[in-house]
Structure formats: C-alpha cells, structure tokens
C-alpha cells in the first residue's frame, strides 16, 4: 500500500511518493516507478483579484526574484543537468559533430566573409557540401536505422533572397520552411519513417496536417493569435506525440478526450516515463506514468505569451517547474526525480 509523506518546512511543502509492501506484483512495479517522485511547493505571494500570474502584482520585483533565486538553488543541478542541442553554437556544434562522426560528416566554422557573424560549412569525407549554415536546429540521430537529420538556414551570397531554409537527411538536401511547419521540428520514428507538420494559415486559424513519408495521416485546426498553437511534436520509438493548445494526440488519438479531461497539456517524459497536466472538474492535476498524483491546483500558468510566458511550465528529463494557484496563494513548484 502506497504511503504519502508530507513534510512542511517554512514555505516549502514536499510530497514524496513511497511504495509499501503487501501489494500484488503489478501494483508494486507501478508504485516503484513513482516511489522517488517528489513534489516541492513554495508559497510565494497571495493572489489579488483578477490576476492571472504572480509577478504582475508584485511591487518589488527585485526582492521577488531574489527570493525565487534562493529557492531555485536547491534543484539547480537537476534543472540544468540535461545537455541540449539548443544552448548556442559554441556548445551545440561539438556535440553534433560527435554524433555525426560515424556518418563521416562534420560541421566546421566558416572563416570566409559571410552575412552572418557565425556560420558553419558542412563536409562529407572532407568534401564541402554546403557553406554558411546557421540556426542549426532539430538535430536527430537514429543509430539503428543509420539516419540523421537537422534543419538549418543558409546564408546566400547573392540575393534576394539572402537566405534559404534547408532540411538535411543523411546528406540529402531538401527545402525546409520553418513557418510552414509551425516552427516545429521534423521527426524520425523507430522504423526510420520521416514525419513533419505542414501548416496553412488563414487569419487567426491554422490548419495543420501531420505528414508521414509524404502521406497525410492526421489534421487539426488551432487558433493562433499571439501564442503558437503547436506546443510540441516528437517521436518516441514507434509512437508520435503531438500537443497543441489543451490537446495531446498520440498516434492520432486524442488522449484528453478519451480520459474525460477538459484540458490536457505539457506532455513530456521524466526518467523515460510519461508526465502531463490535466484539467478535470475545474481543478488542475498531474499524472506520472498513468498515476494521478495527489496534488491539485486551481490554476497552473501555461500557454501564456509575451511577459507572462516567463511563468509558463518548463521541464527536462529530470523534472518540471511551474507556477500554480492554490487556496488563494501562488506557489512556485518543482516536481521530479532528484537522484
């Protein structure tokens, strides 16, 4: 039988899920999966009328963020532990080149004059294929199927246009327009199939089509005014996962509708297990590995644009961190596996 231990330390509430004994094997395995999942809540400021996020009514922002800085120091190691390909060229390119080495491809900094201050040339077996690449993104390696891909912009010497978008799949160069994909990355399934999104936008309504090896397999409509509608699009083994405003689609099935949620958002993996937020009966909950956690909120800041986006949910393979409203107070919350 699972026990829930709640420890109160000043403004900190920590919920630790621990597995017990005496349950059947299936239940024990599930309990074991969440036994080290910790939720830490920090009460920061009371809510004032009609305020939708915490910083707007904080009179002394400097003191507010100084307080948060002290709180965030506890889990800094876990928030920043995940190496990302998007931390800037000086960090990203060595990581990408290490992954490209078995394919005998390489990115080398361009030393010739260019319209960009920093760009890279793309080589195969020391043969120059492309010059002056920048905004190198969406890098994926599939070792099983011996595939790699990434997107980039290429600075052109003569224009207009002065740049073009490209998609490189195993050295094959294809046209790529990030705006036509809703600024989402192409993905690879475990069988080597290439997937991407195609967007047609009219006024504030966008029609998206999910493409798989040039075949249309799913479509949806989403309103896009200031915040982009597609929140994430990625592959996990043979599954593809799409999240757009308050909806999560897995292999073409609307999971939130199936479970009876009015909203489902921020679907990600923590320690290789699925995690997401959902709204049901006007309360926001969290689910980890299909286990609903006993933590409920009146609101969780998400899908905001501009200044309020500072308070949107963030996450990595270790944890999530977010701002939530509960019982008239705003909380800063960190939840995850802290090993």
Image (cartoon, helix red, strand yellow):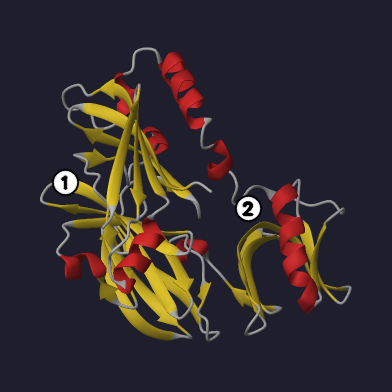
Q: Residue 161 carries which label?
A: none
Residue in the foreground of this view, choosing between 235 and 159 = 235
Q: Do the residues labelled 2 and 1 touch (CB within 8 Å)?
A: no
Quadrant assignment, res 161: bottom right
Binning the other alpha carbons within 10 Å of mark 2 as few (below 14), some (14 to 19) or many (20 upward) gives few
- The residue that appears at 28% across and 46% down in the rendered structure is 4
Circle 1 residue:
283
Q: Residue at x 47, y 64 (%)?
A: 272
The local secondary structure at tag 1 comes to strand
* Vertical order, 305 against 155 (above or below): above
Residue 76 appears in the rendering = yes
Give the answer, above or below, for where 9 lies relative to 133. Answer: above
The picture places residue 317, in percent across and down from the top left corner, at 50, 55
Helix, strand or loop status at disc 2:
loop
Reading the chain from its start, which is encountered first: label 2 or label 1? 2
Locate residue 112 relative to residue 248 in the image: left or right.
right
Looking at this view, name the residue that lies furthest to the front.
Answer: 22
- Residue 260, picture quadrant: bottom left
Side of 255 relative to 237 (left or right): left
Residue annotated with mark 2: 83
Is 252 drawn above or below residue 335 in the view shown?
below
Q: How crowded is mark 1: few (under 14 residues within 10 Å), some or many (20 or more)?
A: some
| Up/down of 159 relative to 91, above or below | below
User: How many numbered discs sit on the rendered protein?
Assistant: 2
Task: Residue 126 in the image: state x and y as whole percent.
Answer: 89, 73
Residue 223 location in percent, x, y?
A: 26, 57
């Amino acid at each position: 039988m699972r026990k829930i231990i709640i420890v109160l330390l000043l403004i900190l509430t920590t919920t630790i899920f621990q597995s017990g004994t005496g349950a059947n094997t299936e239940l024990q395995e599930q309990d074991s999966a969440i036994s080290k999942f910790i939720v830490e809540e920090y009460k920061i400021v009371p809510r004032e009328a009609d305020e939708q996020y915490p910083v707007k009514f904080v009179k002394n922002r400097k003191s507010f963020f100084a307080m948060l800085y002290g709180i965030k120091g506890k889990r800094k190691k876990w928030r920043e532990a995940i190496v990302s390909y998007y931390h800037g060229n000086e960090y990203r390119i060595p990581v990408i080149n290490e992954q490209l080495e078995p394919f005998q491809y390489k990115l080398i900094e361009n030393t010739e004059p260019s319209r960009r201050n920093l760009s890279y040339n793309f080589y195969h077996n020391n043969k120059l294929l492309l010059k002056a690449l920048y905004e190198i993104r969406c890098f994926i390696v599939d070792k099983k199927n011996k595939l790699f891909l990434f997107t980039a912009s290429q600075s052109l010497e003569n224009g207009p246009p002065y740049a073009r978008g490209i998609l490189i799949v195993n050295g094959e160069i294809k046209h790529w327009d990030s705006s036509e994909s809703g600024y989402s990355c192409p993905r690879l399934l475990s069988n080597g199939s290439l997937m991407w999104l195609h967007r047609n936008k009219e006024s504030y309504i966008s029609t998206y089509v999910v493409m798989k090896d040039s075949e249309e397999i799913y479509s949806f409509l989403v309103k896009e005014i200031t915040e982009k509608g597609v929140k994430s699009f990625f592959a996990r083994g043979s599954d593809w996962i799409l999240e757009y405003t308050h909806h999560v689609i897995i292999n073409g099935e609307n999971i939130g509708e199936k479970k009876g949620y009015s909203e489902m958002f921020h679907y990600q993996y923590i320690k290789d297990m699925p995690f997401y937020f959902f709204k049901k009966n006007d309360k926001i909950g969290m689910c980890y590995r299909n286990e609903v956690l006993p933590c409920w909120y009146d609101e969780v800041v998400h899908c905001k644009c501009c200044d309020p986006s500072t308070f949107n949910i963030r996450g990595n393979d270790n944890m999530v961190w977010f701002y939530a409203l509960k019982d008239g107070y705003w909380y800063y919350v960190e939840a995850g596996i802290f090993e």
